[in-house]
């Protein structure tokens, strides 16, 4: 985040803190129908639109710096591999053999020199071209040029790798991310090192998991024993760009900033900054590390959650540094996300079965959940224009006409 943006956001937070209110989100109570979390047809529509027509964050650039290094998808439904070629170029392919569709790269390989399919040994170059077919006499007339791996658009931007699920799609990340991309760039993500990545199945809808991050209302209650001290009387300022959302949450010490010249303010000393990167990633900034959380739907009530923590090596040196990182990871990943936020999300999901609530009712402080949901529905409508309005998930104002 550029310094002037930090100062501007800090000023917003200080004035919100004075009024003890969050920045206005949606200014009315809204209801979300719970079928958006249970309906297999809605998930099918999300898969065909939200997870098909937008760039997705694939991971940190450090994973694909050297020739032959690669990054694999964590989601079997969208099996890609991003690889750095011997020519230094980054490419992405569907990790699926053109013969009979076996997965080519398993993740056990240290570095790739070529793609060799484990099923019948077809070999592809790191440029995706089919180089050789085993027992090729069995394939008379096969034109190798027609059997290259399916290539996907991939780009490195702001220290992160972005992939597009649609072959040939154009990615303009600076426009797509706008000021949020500038924030990420300014943070210097390039210099971070991956500490650890966790991949876990959660029995809750992917949107329900992401939504646990989008309001501070629950913090004093659900996180009474963990985060609440850091966010006592916390308020949230937010920014929307396209389908993405930035949240800055004032920490308990935010008023201390008033004792210091704004020229030396660093927002992360007084606030936590989060990004909901459409569609499936929640990105958390800390002064010396970041958490990247991504959510991949397996079924309406089942989601793959990945959490990668990256850190600034200069801040965590030696054994002591590693011990501090281990502590932070356990705190964030296990104590806060897994045992508190996502445990509740799983309870909510299982409770949906018996129909206690037809809707979830969102107060004003929970407006960003509705914004996130509207963004999903906007994307669904845009790419499925023939869908009748009643078939949308349907963010609904409380007693008012449907939001457009
Ligand atoms: S499926 Fe890959 S070589 Fe047969
Ligand atoms: Fe939480």
Image (cartoon, rainbow, N blue to C red):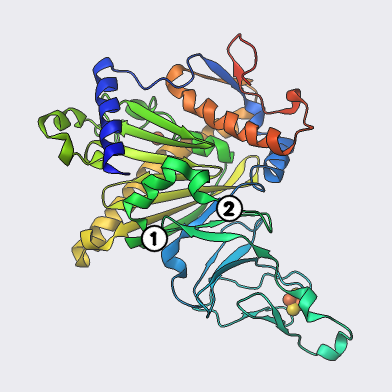
Give the percent coordinates (x, y) of residue 153.
61, 60
Q: Which sits in the foreground, 325 or 162? A: 162
Residue at 85% x, 81% y is: 142
Q: In the drawing, what numbered circle is on residue 171?
A: 2
Question: Height in image: 268 above or below 124?
Answer: above
Q: How many marks?
A: 2
Q: Quadrant of residue 10?
A: top left
N-terminal-most mark, 1 or 2: 2
Give the percent coordinates (x, y) of residue 236.
35, 28
Give the percent coordinates (x, y) of residue 297.
62, 46
* Left or right: 52 in relation to 333: right
* Left or right: 74 in relation to 282: right
Question: Height in image: 124 above or below 70?
Answer: below
Neighbourhood count class around disc 2 (C-alpha, 10 Å): few under 14, some 14–19, many 20 upward: some
Q: CA distance from mark 1 to mark 2?
A: 28 Å
Looking at the image, can residue 47 be seen? yes
Residue at 60% x, 77% y is: 126
- Kindly identify which residue carries mark 1: 196
Neighbourhood count class around disc 1 (C-alpha, 10 Å): few under 14, some 14–19, many 20 upward: some
């Amino acid at each position: 985040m550029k310094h002037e943006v930090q100062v501007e956001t800090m000023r917003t937070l200080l004035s919100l803190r004075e009024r003890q209110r969050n920045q206005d989100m949606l200014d009315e109570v809204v209801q979300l129908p719970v079928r958006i979390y249970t309906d297999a047809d809605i998930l099918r529509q999300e898969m065909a639109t939200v997870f098909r027509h937008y760039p997705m964050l694939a991971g940190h650039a450090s994973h694909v710096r050297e020739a032959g290094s690669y990054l694999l998808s964590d989601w079997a439904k969208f099996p890609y591999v991003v690889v750095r070629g011997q020519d230094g170029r980054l490419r992405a392919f569907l990790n699926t053999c053109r013969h009979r569709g076996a997965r080519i790269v398993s993740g056990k390989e240290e570095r790739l020199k070529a793609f060799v399919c484990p099923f019948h040994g077809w070999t592809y170059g790191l440029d995706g071209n089919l180089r050789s077919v085993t027992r090729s006499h069995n394939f008379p007339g096969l034109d190798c040029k027609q059997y290259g791996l399916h290539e996907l658009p991939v780009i490195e931007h702001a220290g992160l790798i972005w992939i597009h699920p649609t072959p040939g799609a154009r990615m303009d990340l600076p426009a797509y991310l706008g000021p949020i991309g500038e924030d990420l760039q300014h943070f210097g993500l390039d210099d971070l090192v991956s500490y650890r990545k966790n991949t876990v199945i959660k029995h809750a809808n992917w949107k329900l998991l992401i939504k646990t991050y989008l309001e501070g209302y629950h913090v004093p209650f659900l996180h009474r024993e963990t985060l609440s001290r850091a966010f006592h009387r916390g308020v949230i300022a937010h920014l929307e760009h396209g389908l993405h959302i930035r949240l800055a949450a004032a920490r308990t010490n935010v008023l201390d900033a008033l004792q210091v010249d704004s020229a030396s303010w660093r927002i992360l000393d007084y606030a936590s900054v989060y990004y909901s990167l459409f569609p499936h990633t929640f990105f958390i900034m800390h002064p010396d590390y970041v958490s990247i959380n991504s959510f991949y739907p397996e079924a309406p009530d089942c989601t793959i959650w990945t959490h990668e923590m990256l850190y600034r090596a200069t801040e965590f040196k030696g054994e002591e540094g590693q011990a501090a990182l281990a502590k932070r990871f356990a705190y964030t990943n296990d104590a806060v996300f897994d045992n508190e936020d996502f445990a509740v999300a799983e309870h909510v999901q299982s409770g949906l079965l018996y129909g206690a609530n037809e809707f979830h009712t969102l107060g004003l402080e929970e407006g960003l959940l509705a914004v996130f949901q509207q963004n999903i529905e906007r994307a669904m409508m845009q790419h499925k224009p023939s869908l009748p309005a009643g078939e949308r998930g349907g963010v609904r104002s409380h007693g008012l006409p449907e939001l457009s």
